[in-house]
Amino acid sequence: ARRLAALEKKVGITWVPESFWKTGEWLDQLTGPYIVKNHPGKTIFDLCPDPGWLDTHHAPAEEVEYINRKIKELGWKTGHDAHHGDPHDEGARSMGKTH
């Protein structure tokens, strides 16, 4: 157990209570207001490990599957799901040519 704790400390693993994931509290840490409040003058790009990380980093398939399953279990709607059936202006959501 001590060796594991030493490894966790060395690589920067911080454990959080299971409730942190169940309540969606972790989503609060991914929002713009969180970044503005806790990292004044910074953007999400400033907080990435190195330039281009945000463009190239992809979560492992297992992690994506787990997150999607939890979102479904909690009854949350993702940005993609939230728009189904709702009238909206596609031009307002893209940077493509407008009519």
Image (cartoon, helix red, strand yellow):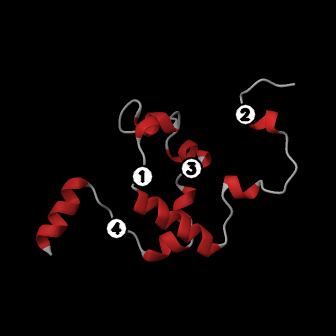
Q: Dot 4: few (<14), some (14–19), or many (≥20) neighbours within 10 Å?
A: few
Is the Cβ of the residue at disc 3 closer than 8 Å to that at disc 4? no
The amino acid on which the numbered mark 3 sits, given as a three-letter code, is Tyr
Q: Residue at image x 85%, y 45%?
A: 88
Q: Which residue is label 2 attached to?
A: 94
Dot 3 or dot 1: first in sequence order is 3
Q: Residue at image x 11%, y 68%?
A: 3
Mark toward the viewer: 4 or 1: 1
Q: Which residue is label 1 attached to?
A: 59
Q: Dot 3: few (<14), some (14–19), or many (≥20) neighbours within 10 Å?
A: few
Give the Cα distance between marks 3 and 2: 25 Å
Up-down relation of residue 59 to residue 2 (above or below): above
Q: Dot 2: few (<14), some (14–19), or many (≥20) neighbours within 10 Å?
A: few
Q: Tag on residue 15?
A: 4
Residue 48 locus on image (x, y percent): 41, 39
Give the Cα distance between marks 1 and 2: 25 Å
Q: Residue at image x 85%, y 54%?
A: 86
Image quadrant assignment for residue 18 = bottom left
Give the position of the N terminus as an image quadrant: bottom left
Q: Which residue is label 3 attached to?
A: 34
Q: Residue at image x 61%, y 70%?
A: 72
Task: Report how many numbered discs are placed on residues in the image.
Answer: 4
Q: Dot 1: few (<14), some (14–19), or many (≥20) neighbours within 10 Å?
A: few
Dot 3 or dot 4: first in sequence order is 4
Is the Cβ of the residue at disc 3 closer than 8 Å to that at disc 2? no
Residue 92 in the figure: left or right of residue 9 = right
Image quadrant assignment for residue 14 = bottom left
Residue 97 locus on image (x, y percent): 78, 23
The amino acid on which the numbered mark 2 sits, given as a three-letter code, is Ser
Dot 1 or dot 2: first in sequence order is 1
Which secondary structure lies at badge 3? helix
